[in-house]
Image (spheres, grey):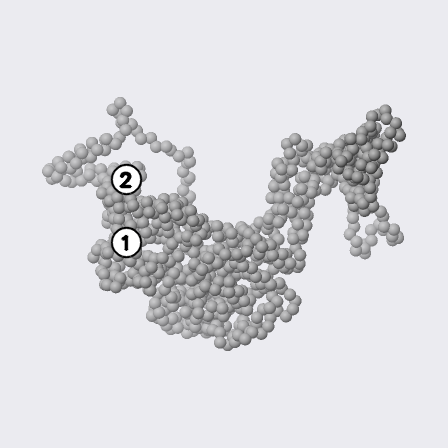
Amino acid sequence: MDESFVSGFVNTQDELKQLLECHSRVTLTSFAKWSNDENNKRKRGGNNRLVWKLEDIDENVPLQITNRQILSCQYGKPPQARRTQLQVSDHSYDSRSKKRLRIQKSRKVGCPSKLYIRHIKRFNGFQQPKTVSETQKREAMKALKKQINVNEDATNPQVVIHVKLPLHSSHQNHNVSKESGFSKPIHSAVRHKIYEYVSLGVTSVPLIKRVLKTFVESELCHENEVKPQPNDQAYFPNNRVIQTHVHHALVAGRFSGLDQENLAQKIVVWQETMVQSHFFFRKCTDEESGTAAVTNKSNTERCFPSENGEGVDDMSYKPQNTFLFIHQTKQQQQILQRYGELVLLDATYRTTKYALPLFLVVVRTNVGYIPVAEFVCESETTAHIAEALSIIKDWNPHWKPQFFMIDYSEQEYQALQEVFPESQKYVCSFHREQAWIRWCREGKNQLTANDQQQLLHMLRTIATAESKQKCDRAIKHLRSSKLYLSNDKVRTYTETRWLCICKRWCRAYALPGFNVSVTTNNGVEALNRTLKQFYLKLTTTSTVSSLADTLINDFIPDQIMSYTRNNYICSSQYRAYDAKIPKFLHDRPRSFVKHCLTKIDAASVYASKDVEPMGDNTYKVRSENTQEWYEVFLGDTATLPRCQCASFMLSFMPCKHIFAIFEHSDATWDSLSPLYRDNPYFNLDSDFLSREAQLKTAAAEEQEGDNDTHVQHEEVQSSKSEIIGPCLSVQSCQKRLREKLKVLQDLSFLSSDVPVMSDVILLLDSAHVKLKETIQTENQLPLHQHTKKSNLRQLPQRKKRKKKDPKPKTEMRSAETANRSNDSAPKKRVQCETTSEASGKNLHYFQRYSAKNP
């Protein structure tokens, strides 16, 4: 018996796989396929011979080999050398040769070790005793062959797999040691796991190395199996091997230079699985990329006139064979239909390795900013942007946008003007400020620091003017300034670039509505930053297909889920509302509820004399800080409310004057215009909440409505006893009580009225008895109230360093912030009430307000 091998039988293919893996882990050897009968047409198609004995198998049972596999050691016979004439040279290395010098050649050293696998059929029904003669064996074999030709299944053969495993002694010309694991090729399951992670966008080698270790120890190797050794590179590959297979996985996912074929194949799959989503894809070809259009650019109004006439986008160009990818889901269409009055458009780059801009079409919802469509075009030109917007417009026939917020981009404006000519286009205030500051800082304009500050102040005054009259006065002040008259560059820049299009960026020309609260594209910038720094951070493919995959499978679903979740957590089904919150504020966005509570609290300082009705749902409310009166119109079925105060004009949200009217008149929340009261920004989106949640919320509201009158009556009756209790902590009450006692002690030295002091003594005796009843005692002795101390020590306060006066710099801030900071300084109201009285008054006001506005 050959001592260099060990042999045996297994019954299934899984047992064979497990046996070979355990053999490889123990011996640290690796075998490659040498021959397989299944790949040999002659052996695969012919009838296999029946034998009684097969090498070391001799059990007097007919055997039939159905398949034979031979695996050779990885250090086995080298490949056949090419019969080419070797060039003779004086040196072993020719520096002129272009072939790569391999310092260490093939690992093949001619090791004869082989591993044999035979798939055998055993016909146990024709087994013969050991004493049988050869003639009887031949007769039994003839009968077996006859039976096989008639019906092989009737012979009931047993299929087994015979394995002949080589031991260490069978290897030659190389050593088998612990270091042999470094030369083993990577395991197929480990390689497939790397491909799987790369397909998910994970390409970080350290991260993949950690997860592979967990995969091998917990999933690949079972508890009763031999564990691989730490130096076994087949299961624990090094960083270079992982990086190589990551690269192979990335290359395998690309079908063309621009990855267009791969994207086209993915879109076919997405269209089958996402039936309600819209896709548009056009490949980039080398043919003529555009044709002339009928559009006449001379009739198109320019948003940003050029000083020298350059930079005008040719509107007669229509793309035909340029790259374009557009996507929109059914949920995005619903959100666009609900909030499509104001749309923000912005482009971002560096999302792929190609210079392709990604455009996000974004709307402001009741809970934040949500992308409602996205497209990637070949370049940021008017024709490319207009084509994409036209397709999105065709997908949403009922979408009628009134306002667009764009960057300082002539191409975006011209595209919107072509597709949506009736919509109002505004320039983002942040990019407007950025353009001003960059121009002021350019050395060629020769502006001093004082000139920069003066010019920026005048431009900001124009931008933040609340009326057209104030805007005209600010423009007149700019044109009459010394800087404007003495500097030709300032005069040319302001006139040709900004003053001629002041309707695009001046607040005085902004139409009233919910659009006034959005002045920048910061919401879109935040989405772009999230996409780049979080979603695209996990992948280094930088291809268009990977970008589309991330958008469709990760980014957009997460944004829709966030929108749904934020609407749900604001509903009473998520958590019950506090009884002090007015009923009309239930089931509304959190930001709107907080805003209204702040304004209700601010309206508590008004009295009945400060509110005067004027008829037709119009009122006059006195200003809190001045003697000025504001005219407030609550609106009707066709007109939105309006108020002359700055808070309402800047946010278009209910101001304190409206809540003062609710408190001191017969008007309630229902008196507001239904166009304003039922707008989507003040209400939750029921279309994205499940039917069960809506039914439960309605039932809870109905139950609260039945008990509302009784609960509010009890709250009003007990308001005097709850003025301090619910609002203050124990420590605050103790502190205030000691302050009152200290005041009484000081007054006792000043008062000389005996009857009054006698009455106060009686009141203090009563208070003493009442306060003593609340103290816990044990055996008639008062107990200390021990409070649990925190284990965390208080950090020392950091001392601030004295800063030197900085040199005057041009501060980059929005015009609204600059103007607001100048106007808000003198507007402070002095409160003469004590803290406890103010707290009690506010709480009492909330209770009365809740009872009046259920």
Q: Earlier in the sequence, mark 1 or mark 2?
A: 1
Using the rendered image of the protein, determine whether residue 94 is visible from the camera's viewpoint: yes
Q: Quadrant of residue 711?
A: top left
What amino acid is at disc 2? Gly
Q: 828 above or below 59? A: below
- Specify whether 250 is left or right of 486: right
- What residue would you read off at disc 2? 725
| Mark 1: secondary structure | helix
Spot the residue most to the top: 779
| Mark 2: secondary structure | loop
* Residue neighbourhood size for the residue with mark 2, other residues' Cα within 10 Å, grouped as few (<14), some (14–19), many (≥20): few
Residue at x-position 66% and y-position 42%: 190
Q: 798 above or below 819? A: above
Residue at x-position 36% and y-position 44%: 576
- Specify whether 461 is left or right of 318: left
User: Are the residues flagged by discs 1 and 2 in contact, CB closer than 8 Å?
Assistant: no
Looking at the image, how many numbered discs can be counted on the residues?
A: 2
Q: Nearer the viewer, residue 443 or 462?
A: 462
Q: 78 above or below 284? A: above
Q: Quadrant of the N terminus?
A: top right
- What residue would you read off at disc 1? 603
Query: Residue 511: image x %, image y %?
Result: 38, 66
Query: Residue 29: image x %, image y %?
Result: 75, 37
Q: Nearer the viewer, residue 308 or 73?
A: 73
Measured in 3D between alpha carbons, the distance from the residue under mark 1 to the one under mark 2, in whole angstroms, is: 23 Å
Q: Quadrant of residue 133?
A: top right
Residue at x-position 67% and y-position 53%: 251
Query: Residue 109: image x %, image y %?
Result: 82, 41
- Specify whether 158 is left or right of 589: right
Residue at x-position 84% and y-position 38%: 49
Query: Residue 301: image x %, image y %?
Result: 47, 73
